[in-house]
């Protein structure tokens, strides 16, 4: 009887440990949100933030309010379309097929094509399937973004030709009027300035400061018009730069900020895990508690 009692206690203890482990795993999930806003700016290097403390007060405010890393990496080549596609599609170019800076269609046959939307599965389609009544929207100031998402899954789409101020105004009006469940605001600078004058040049710093001011306008608009108890905000970029270009393998070209803010997300905390572009879409899915497509291999940065 004693041996049976001892075995029973051991089984009970093991079950309790397993239960604790499951509870800990559940606790590691991102806090559930009703709204997620993705703010992306083209060519904003992590290096410029590190070398100019105090010059980007709004991005520093995001970092203070949320969890962040200055070491989020691009996939290669460290160029625009390939990395924006990766941010939105939860997998790399070998899966979604967009391989160049200005890809309009996949140069490589995608590993899978969503039969409903005709692209490799992206976050907008995932939101539409997981939240059929969701309000979604995207505003962008570089036409290249328009080829990288499922238009049929998005309620509100606006493009402004290289006009970040107009894009910001339109996006803020959309936020005020529709209170979207998932939205993406794309800012085309400081990439153009980097190509013209060089990354880390005074002109590039000034362009980053302008971007910082727009980020501040968007952040304030979100805080004033959306429920702070159920809204998360992500800020990031596609790549950095070196000299007057990018696309290479240096950390100056590959590393960018990644910041996530929201209730239940630790404030002022550095994200210690590796963060890649393909981790962004799974992070959004995690926050909204929707199912990530099985073709994605990225992981939520909040787990």
Image (tube, rainbow, N blue to C red):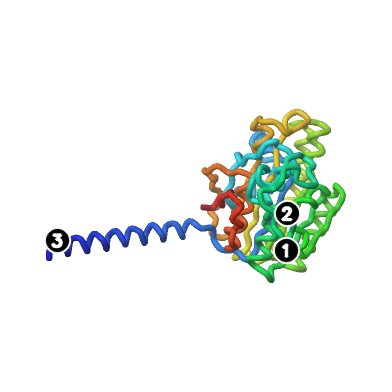
At mark 3, the secondary structure is: helix
Cα–Cα gap, marks 2 and 3: 61 Å
Of residue 142 and residue 65, the one placed in the foreground of this image is: 142
Residue in the image at 71% along x and 52% along y: 39
Q: Which residue is mark 3?
A: 3
Q: Which residue is mark 2?
A: 119
How far across and down, in percent of the image, does residue 24 sit? 42, 57
How far across and down, in percent of the image, does residue 132 sit? 67, 69
Question: Nearer the N terminus, badge 2 or badge 1?
Answer: 2
Residue 53 seen = no
Question: Nearer the N terminus, badge 2 or badge 3?
Answer: 3
Of residue 179 and residue 143, the one placed in the foreground of this image is: 143
Cα–Cα gap, marks 3 and 1: 61 Å
Check the image and report above or below for 231 versus 51: below
Check the image and report above or below for 267 versus 197: below
Residue 183 seen = yes
At mark 1, the secondary structure is: strand
Question: Nearer the N terminus, badge 3 or badge 1?
Answer: 3
* Residue at the extreme top of the image, as rendered: 243
How far across and down, in percent of the image, does residue 292 sit? 60, 58
Q: Are marks 2 and 3 in contact (CB under 8 Å)?
A: no
Q: Are marks 3 and 1 in contact (CB under 8 Å)?
A: no
At mark 2, the secondary structure is: loop
Q: Which residue is mark 1?
A: 136
Check the image and report above or below for 254 versus 223: above
């Amino acid at each position: 009887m004693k041996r049976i009692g001892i075995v029973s206690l051991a089984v009970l203890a093991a079950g309790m440990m397993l239960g604790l482990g499951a509870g800990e795993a559940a606790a590691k999930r991102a806090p559930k949100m009703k709204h997620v806003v993705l703010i992306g700016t083209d060519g904003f290097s992590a290096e410029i933030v590190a070398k100019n403390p105090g010059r980007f007060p709004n991005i520093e405010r995001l970092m203070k309010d949320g969890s962040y890393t200055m070491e989020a990496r691009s996939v290669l080549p460290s160029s625009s379309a390939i990395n924006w596609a990766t941010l939105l599609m939860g997998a790399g170019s070998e899966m979604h097929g967009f391989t160049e800076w200005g890809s309009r269609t996949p140069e490589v046959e995608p590993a899978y094509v969503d039969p409903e939307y005709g692209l490799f599965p992206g976050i907008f389609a995932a939101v539409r399937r997981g939240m059929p009544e969701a309000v979604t929207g995207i505003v962008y100031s570089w036409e290249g973004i328009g080829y990288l998402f499922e238009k049929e899954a998005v309620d509100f789409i606006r493009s402004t030709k290289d006009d970040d101020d107009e894009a910001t105004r339109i996006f803020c009006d959309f936020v005020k009027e529709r209170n979207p469940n998932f939205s993406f605001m794309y800012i085309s600078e400081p990439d153009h300035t980097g190509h013209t004058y060089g990354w880390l040049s005074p002109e590039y710093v000034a362009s980053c400061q302008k971007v910082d001011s727009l980020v501040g306008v968007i952040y304030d608009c979100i805080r004033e018009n959306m429920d702070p108890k159920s809204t998360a905000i992500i800020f990031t970029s596609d790549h950095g730069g070196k000299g007057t270009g990018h696309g290479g393998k240096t950390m100056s070209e590959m590393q960018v900020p990644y910041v996530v803010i929201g209730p239940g997300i630790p404030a002022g905390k550095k994200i210690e895990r590796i963060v890649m572009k393909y981790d962004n879409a799974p992070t959004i899915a995690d926050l909204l508690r929707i199912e990530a497509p099985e073709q994605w291999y990225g992981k939520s940065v909040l787990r």
